[in-house]
Structures are given as structure tokens and as C-alpha cells.
Image (cartoon, rainbow, N blue to C red):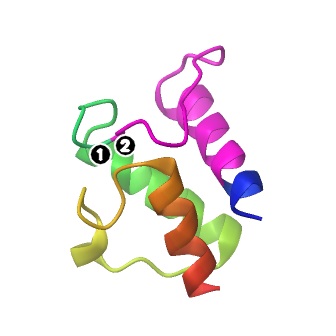
């Protein structure tokens, strides 16, 4: 299940946030600490996650400590379901 989530998240980030549909984001690539996405994009991603997976993300959880990679984010989503 987490593989499906990481794929969907990678697609969302590449297409909607980075506007680079062919960009490949690996499950262990840092997305926040590397600067790949900024704080505004992080909010967009959080809204996508809440709408798509029905998972509530607190403002205090929107940081690299909670999820910096797609794997961490997928595990976070899975744990909240």
C-alpha cells in the first residue's frame, strides 16, 4: 500500500507542484531539506494528502522532521488511516 501512496505523491509533486511531469522522485529523496519543495508547496501537498487520503495533518507536523521523504510521508499516511 505504501508503494501506491509514494507513487501518487511523487506524481502529484512532479506534475502539480514542480510542473515537471517527467521528473522522477525516488522514495528516499529528501523533498523538504533539499529545497525541492518550499513551504507554500508543502501546504499544497498537505491539502492534497488530506483530500485524497482523509488524513489530518497538524500545522506543527508540516516539517522535515515529520516527513522529508516520500517513504516517511507514506508511512505517516498509513499510520493515520
Residue 72, x across and y down, in percent:
45, 60
13 shown above or below 21: below
Q: Quadrant of residue 25?
A: top right
Label drawn at residue 78: none
Distance from Cα at disc 2 to Cα at disc 1: 4 Å
What's the residue at 37%, 43% (across, down)? 41
80 shown above or below 76: below
What's the residue at 51%, 49% (across, down)? 70
| Label total for image | 2
Residue 38, x across and y down, in percent:
26, 39
Neighbour class for label 1 at 10 Å: few (<14), some, many (≥20)? few
Label drawn at residue 41: 2
Residue 3, x across and y down, in percent:
72, 53
What's the residue at 57%, 17% (across, down)? 23
Q: Is residue 81 left or right of residue 13?
A: right
Residue 63, x across and y down, in percent:
24, 60
Magenta region: 6-31
Marks 2/1 in contact by CB < 8 Å: the verdict is yes
3 shown above or below 76: above
The residue beneath circle 1 is: 40
Amino acid at each position: 500500500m505504501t508503494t501506491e501512496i509514494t507513487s501518487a505523491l511523487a506524481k502529484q509533486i512532479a506534475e502539480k507542484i514542480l510542473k515537471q511531469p517527467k521528473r522522477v522522485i525516488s522514495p528516499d529523496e529528501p523533498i523538504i531539506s533539499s529545497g525541492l519543495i518550499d513551504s507554500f508547496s508543502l501546504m499544497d501537498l498537505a491539502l492534497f494528502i488530506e483530500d485524497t487520503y482523509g488524513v489530518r495533518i497538524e500545522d506543527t507536523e508540516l516539517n522535515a522532521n515529520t516527513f522529508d521523504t516520500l517513504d516517511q510521508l507514506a508511512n505517516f499516511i498509513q499510520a493515520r488511516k
